[in-house]
Image (tube, grey):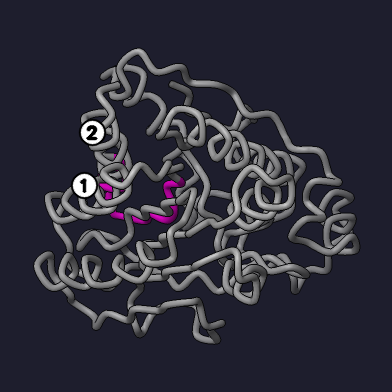
Amino acid sequence: MQFFFPDVPPLPLPDGHRFPAGKYSALRAIIDAERVLGRTQLIAAKPVAADILLKAHSSVYIEEMLSGSVAPDMMRRIGLPWSIELVNRSRATVAGAIASGRAALTQGISGQLAGGTHHSHRDFGSGFCVFNDLAVAALTLLDEGAVGRIAIVDTDVHQGDGNAAILGADPRVFILSIQGEKNFPFRRVAATLDVDLPDGTTDADYLAAVHSALEPVIAFRPELVFFLSGADPLAEDRLGRLSLTHAGLSARDRLVLETFKSRGVPVAIAIGGGYAEPISASVAAYANTFRVAAELWKL
């Protein structure tokens, strides 16, 4: 079995920046130290070639991001300062999404210890997202004929507007987005199916909503599912506004993964958002997603 991680330096962020960049290395440390994925091979994903990004992004936006000439207001929309480390991490995350999708098709389950940059649009980034990893991966695999239908099951608490903007008109893709109804982004792009949840939603209601929402995804008969898990529905999350427990998130992961495993549909995991205080709560939730996958696939 193969899982992936972006093999690039950490982001150079100013002190006090609200994006918890250290969560990625902390997650990998847990995966390694506790052997969460058993004997699974962790593979370093290198930055993807710039021409692959053209699957989902305009040449102008790509060139501006790679050269550092992107306008300051566009960087403010992303919410991160420009750096070559940011560009390379974003490109490596795209590479990890493509690689995990391909690996899932042969081994049933894969994923990366990053990813889920679902706010990035064709011509601009947003919400800590530079390049849209799942959009590029989905279009790459579809266009090369590896699969004919892909579903994105997005349970990050924030609506996947970039996924919907890039992929929403493509009949080969089904996008399920389950999110807080009063959360970012405030200008949304309709997914194939959006499920809005009120502030304070707890485990039972959340799981019932996920269960119902999976039915039309199953009916779509996807040949590959990208599962954007998201740790930000946790009650501890600073940006989440829902009230799930760790047990509730693990139950969500089990529900989604069992649903597709039982039908023989390969799944590739992307971890999505997580902004808990302390951030160790988000990291623990991410690790639990991979624990559930390891148990189900006996890794």
Left or right of 292, for residue 127: right
Estimate the spatial distance between the alpha carbons at disc 1 and disc 2, rounded to whole Å.
8 Å
- Residue at left offset 58%, top offset 53%: 134
Left or right of 27, for residue 46: right
Write down the residue under mark 1: 254
In the rendered picture of this protein, how many numbered marks are placed on residues?
2
Q: Range of the magenta residues?
A: 270-283
Q: What is the quadrant of residue 189 in the picture? A: bottom right
**For this rendering, which residue is in front, 13 or 53?**
53
User: Could you tell me residue 132's position as x and y percent?
Assistant: 64, 57
Name above or below for residue 13 compared with residue 3: below
Marks 1 and 2: CB-CB under 8 Å?
yes
Left or right of 67, for residue 237: left
* Residue 70 highlighted magenta (yes or no): no
User: Could you tell me residue 162's position as x and y percent?
Assistant: 60, 69
- Residue at left offset 41%, top offset 33%: 108
Give the main secondary structure, helix, strand or loop, of the magenta stretch. loop
Type of the residue with mark 2: Leu
**For this rendering, which residue is in front, 15 or 55?**
55
At numbered mark 1, what does the secondary structure look like: helix, strand or loop?
helix
User: Could you tell me residue 286's position as x and y percent?
Assistant: 32, 42
Q: Residue 299 carries which label?
A: none
- Residue at left offset 68%, top offset 65%: 125
- Residue at left offset 17%, top offset 75%: 201
At numbered mark 2, what does the secondary structure look like: helix, strand or loop?
helix
User: Could you tell me residue 11's position as x and y percent?
Assistant: 61, 41
Name above or below for residue 137 compared with residue 179: above
Type of the residue with mark 1: Arg
Q: Earlier in the sequence, mark 1 or mark 2?
A: 1
Write down the residue under mark 2: 296
